[in-house]
Every structure is written in C-alpha cells, then in structure tokens.
Amino acid sequence: MDTEFDEKRQRRRRRRIRNQIAAIIVFVAVIAAVMVGIFFGARKLYRMFTAYKQEVEEQLATEETTPVVSITDEEPIVIEAPEEEAEEETAVPTQEELLDQIVNTLISEMPLEDKVAGLFILTPEQLTGVDTAVKAGTGTQDALGAYAIGGLVYAVKNIKDEEQIKEMLKTTSGMSKYPVFMAVSESGASSTVARALSLTEVDSAKTIGQTGDWEAAATAAETQAVYLSDLGFNLNLGVDCNLSEEESSFGTDAEAVSPMVARTVEGLASNGVNSCLRFFPAKGDTASGMATAEPSEEEQAATEQVFRAGIEAGATMVCVGNISMPGLTGDNTPCDLSAAVVTSLLREQLGYDGIVITDALNEKAITEYYTSEQAALLALAAGADLLYLPEDFKAAYEGVLAAVQDQTIPEARIDTSLKRIYRVKYRNKVEDITAATP
C-alpha cells in the first residue's frame, strides 16, 4: 500500500516537473521571438519553438511510460536538480549594424539606372532644363522620375523669399524616390542663403580666425545650421580647410585653424546639417583653366592636418579639387581625377573612408581636356563617390551607365560609393525605420 502511494506521489512530482519545463520552454520561446523578430519574423520563430516544445513534451511523455522504481523506506527520496543548460544569448544589433542592413537592402533593390543617377549632384537647371528654377513643378517631378540623382545645389537666383525656397525644397524632396542632398555653399565670406534672404551674415572665417576664438567658429556654424535646416537644406559645401589669407579661410597656421574647422563641422551637425571640407589637397583658380600647385612637404603636411581635424570631427564629405599637382600625380591630371590623390593619399594615407565629392566638373580645368563622359569615368576610377556639376549631365550619366552595363566598371564599384552616400542619408532614420518594421 505504501509502495503504491509512493509511486503515485512520484508520478505527480514528475508531472509537475514536466509542466514546469514546458512552461520554461514556452517563456524562452516568446522572449527569443520578441528579441530577434525584427530579423527573422515572429511567425517563423513561433513555428520553430512550437515544434521544439512538442518534441520535448513527447520525450517527457515517453519517460512517463517507463516503469517507476519502487521506493522503500530504506531508500530515501533524492530529487536531483536538473542540469542547467547555458542559455544562448541573442545578439542585439547595434545602430551601425541596423544602418548597414537598411542601406544594403535599399541598394540591392535599386535599378541600375537609379544607382548611377544617385552618384550625381546637379543644379535644378541642369536637372530640369529651365533657365532659372524657383519652383518644383511637373518638370521637376518628371526629371526626378527619370533620373534619381543624389543631390541638388542651389544658388542665389533660386531663392526669392523664405516661403518660396522652403516650399521648393520640401516639394522637391517629396518628389524624389530616395533621400537627396539639398546643398548650398554657405560661409561668412560667401553666404548664398543669408544674402538672398537679407539675413544677418556671420563673420567671415578670416575674421573669426583673427580672434583666435574656437567657440566663435562653432557659434557661427550653429547660426547657419539653424536657418539652413529650417529652410530644408541638409548639406553645406562651404567649409574651407585651405591655409590662406583669403576671407573664406581661418588663417595660415594649421595649429590655430584645425580646431576652428573641427568646431565648424560640429556646429553645423548640431542642427542636422552635413558638412563638406574643401579643397583637398590644395586650392587654386581652376574656373578659368588649368592651375597647378607644388607645396612643400611642410605645407602639404599642414594642410593634411587641417583636413584630418575636420574628418575626425565628423565631416560628411571631402571635396577633392580640380587643381593639378604633378608632384603627387606625376602629370597634370586634376587631383579629383587622380587615384594617386583620391585613393592613395586621401583614403589610404589619411585613412578617410567617407564620401569623396569632385570639384565642379564644368570648370575649364576639366572641360578643356576631357569630355563629360571621360571626366565622370576617370573620377570614379580614381575613387570618387559623388560627381559634382558635370558640364553635360546626360552624357556623363549615359557614359557611366554604359560602362557598368558592359562591365568596364563593376556594379560592385558603384555599390561601394552608394553605401557611403546612403549611410549618411539614412543614419538619422534608423529608429523610425525599425519602429515601422512589422
């Protein structure tokens, strides 16, 4: 009689243990599904863990049918604690990993035509063919539908008043398939927006540099970032890193200029405005034709110090100039078309892996020696990512597209540039995108 009672008691104990294990399995399944559902899908996880739960229950049911050893008074009841299996931790993706996934997914689904168009920054006039663009209408919509360009740059003639330019930028952005850079060149020495709208202009870089006040540089940039962002601009092309006596430069001493450039980059970023450092590795008058520069080793090192400060502060892109530097390239090739400058010097020696944008490809330093197609292809071969203002956009676009189609340029090369570009465009959208993911 006692033996039968002990057997029943043992069976009840085994049943409770079985139920507890099953409950734990279900709980772990739910937690795991929540943590990794964004990547693998909750339904898939649910099916997987349901199957696993059923398998465990079947094993437990099999054990229940085995004979129970009779327990006597001489054999004390000993319940051994089950061995705890190490729980496999589910890695939670970082923001950078999520950003990479978003960008890679986007690029993998883009038509080749959109990929190639995304490498160009144009004026609104180049895009639409009108003389002066002051409104985004059907012409803009049709053009953006045909060419999913990477960005637009605006001049004084495009800005009539605050409401007009704000509406123009907002409408244009809404018409684009993908996020676009809305660019302007804004500095105290050349304030496109401030002058067009009669805003109070910040001091020139030269004036700020003479004060030696780093925070004055930050304050000026923050002021610009506020009104630029409010209007819809997200990229300032006007951060001058060259050492000179010009109004656009903070001065000639790299030790004094470097922190001012860094604070300018940070000031712009404080209100969501990307920055472009220019002109690497030297500045020259290339609008009227070829210009050359032969800096000494000390001068070159000083310039690189300033650019490095801006890069470390988080600059979005670096503009490589049209100037020729035979000492670096071995010939008169413009720097932005030279792999010796873009890849060997900027990327490898300085370790820069952000966006490289060319200087204006419609300047005489380019157009007197290269067709629009040749300039675009050479810039990409050199390692550039964004092609800025080609003389003939459609010729440049068709040339690059054909080169990728016939595999003269690997499509993976285009993808590499697009990843740099779209990492910037989507870096502040990760939380919104992941929150919207079912």
Image (cartoon, grey):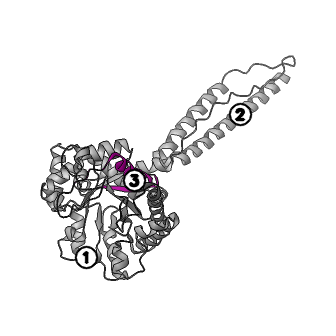
Q: Is residue 414 placed above or below 174 in the rendered structure?
A: above
Q: Please tell me which residue lies in front, 212 or 40.
A: 212
Tag 2–tag 1 contact (CB < 8 Å): no
Badge 1 amino acid = Gly
- Residue 327 visible in rendering: yes
Which disc number belongs to residue 307?
3
Badge 3 amino acid = Phe
- Magenta stretch: give its range: 292-319
Q: How many numbered callouts?
A: 3
Badge 2 amino acid = Ile
Q: Is residue 214 placed above or below 309 in the rendered structure?
A: below
CA distance separating discs 3 and 1: 39 Å
Tell me if residue 296 is in the magenta stretch: yes
Residue 12, image x and y in percent?
Answer: 75, 32
Q: Earlier in the sequence, mark 2 or mark 1?
A: 2
- Residue 104 visible in rendering: no
For this orientation, the residue located farthest to the top is 74
Q: Residue at x 79, y 30 (%)?
A: 9
Task: Quickly name the residue at label 1.
Answer: 137
Q: Is residue 126 placed above or below 371 in the rendered structure?
A: below
Which disc number belongs to residue 17?
2
Q: Earlier in the sequence, mark 3 or mark 1?
A: 1
Q: Secondary structure at mark 2?
A: helix
Q: Residue at x 68, y 37 (%)?
A: 19
Residue 175, image x and y in percent?
Answer: 30, 69
Q: Earlier in the sequence, mark 3 or mark 2?
A: 2
- What is the quadrant of residue 32 in the picture? top right
- Decide if residue 7 is on the left or right side of residue 377: right
Q: Please tell me which residue lies in front, 128 or 233.
A: 233
- Decide if residue 180 is on the left or right side of residue 145: right
